[in-house]
Amino acid sequence: MTLPPLWTRNFRLLWAASFMMAVSFYFLLPTLPLYVVQWLHASPTDVGWIIGLFTLTALAVRPFAGLALDRFGRKTVYLPALILFALAMAGYLIPQTLAGLLVLRLIHGIFWGMTTTGGGTLAADIVPPARRGEGLSWYGMTMTLGMALGPVGGLWLLRDHGPTTLFVAATVLGLSGALAAALLRPPVIAPRPPSPFAWSSLIEGRLRWVALLFALYAATYGGVVSFITLYGAELGIVNSGWFFLTYAVAVATIRPVAGRTMDRRGPAGLFTIALVLLMTGFAILALAQGLIGFLVAAAVLGLGSGIVMPTCFTMGINLVEPYRRGAANGTLFSALDLGIGLGAVLLGIVAHHFGLAAMYACSIGVLLPALMLFHLKVLPDYRTRMTPSPPSTDPS
């Protein structure tokens, strides 16, 4: 059977828009804390608020963004949000007080939540159903490559050219992404049936088990992104950026394979392998004594993560009608944000009392319940919902 094409004009434009937005975002991820401390003379606590507010507002807006995408159309919501996300980057060029920067981060987080939810929903609409897992895997590569390239480029711009050049470059990249998005001609999705607003419509209830599973994974990921630089320093590793590069290469390597496997064989064996890889990676990380163990752990964790994320999103999209894809993406992205945030806090408490190596060992204890949840709840529920109902018979 000949598969329908994946890299259509729409998909290429969406991929380019998302990639430029991701690099723009990751320019600031490692550099904004340095800017706040060195240029605004703020404290580490202030840095925590500046990073945290962005995440909290993105989390809060995602369910509303999903509802808006379903009710008003994908491009109608996505394109203005992407333009405003890019223009918010220009806001950093205005001389800032700490209070002003906190307000800007709050606004910026809103548009980040809207654009990432909108882009994922557009990707689900554009890719052929027969290649949904593969297509969403390739789309997710935009964030992976952004994570690999953005921090390196952002740190170079800040170090060699200063914050003004950094913020201008981030703004230009964001606006370039918006230009690509403006050229999109996405398929028309039949609108959801008219109904009065209900708070329950913000979250897609059929995804509750998938979302909980995703949040457990995200909690362990929160421990990685929040503390891996400190752990690298503890191990005597000068440049922990090698961890992120190795991690990103592993994710990029496995994602297309994972997507095709999901399309052909489903999630059962695939997701089990992913969780085993993640637990193995955290064990290696907890036992690492130097650079080799550090990078081997990064590769194994990257392979596991590269399977988990597209598999969860593909399951979620498969379980809902086209007019609920916005709500489905909002639900899963909210689970991701919430898991990362709570994981960073709770694992940080473990690290404070028992050390970073013990914290990464505890991450295995988070993934064991995830493995049980997948086999006892997520997989049976997914199989039941994906099995067509037998035709009814009329006894008359």
Image: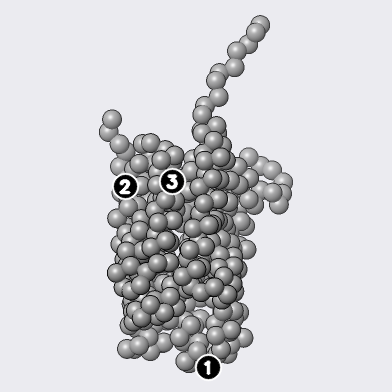
Q: Secondary structure at mark 3?
A: helix
Q: Quick check: 119 above or below 93?
A: above
In three-dimensional space, the C-alpha distance between marks 1 and 3, rounded to whole angstroms, equals 45 Å
- Location of residue 372 in the rendering, given as x and y in whole percent from the top left corner: 54, 45
- Location of residue 392 in the rendering, given as x and y in whole percent from the top left corner: 59, 17
- Of residue 68 and residue 33, the one placed in the foreground of this image is 33
The residue under label 3 is: 271
Report whether 133 appears left or right of 7.
right
- Label 1: how many residues lie within 10 Å, few (<14), some (14-19) or many (20+)? few
Name the residue at 58% across, 51% down. Answer: 212
- Label 3: how many residues lie within 10 Å, few (<14), some (14-19) or many (20+)? many
- Location of residue 265 in the rendering, given as x and y in whole percent from the top left corner: 38, 36
In three-dimensional space, the C-alpha distance between marks 2 and 3, rounded to whole angstroms, equals 13 Å
Name the residue at 29% across, 55% down. Answer: 253
The residue under label 1 is: 41
Q: What amino acid type should be assigned to the residue bearing mark 2?
A: Val
- Of residue 56 and residue 273, the one placed in the foreground of this image is 273
Q: Secondary structure at mark 2?
A: helix
In terms of sequence position, does the residue under pointer 1 or pointer 2 come before the other? 1
Name the residue at 40% across, 44% down. Answer: 270
The residue under label 2 is: 257
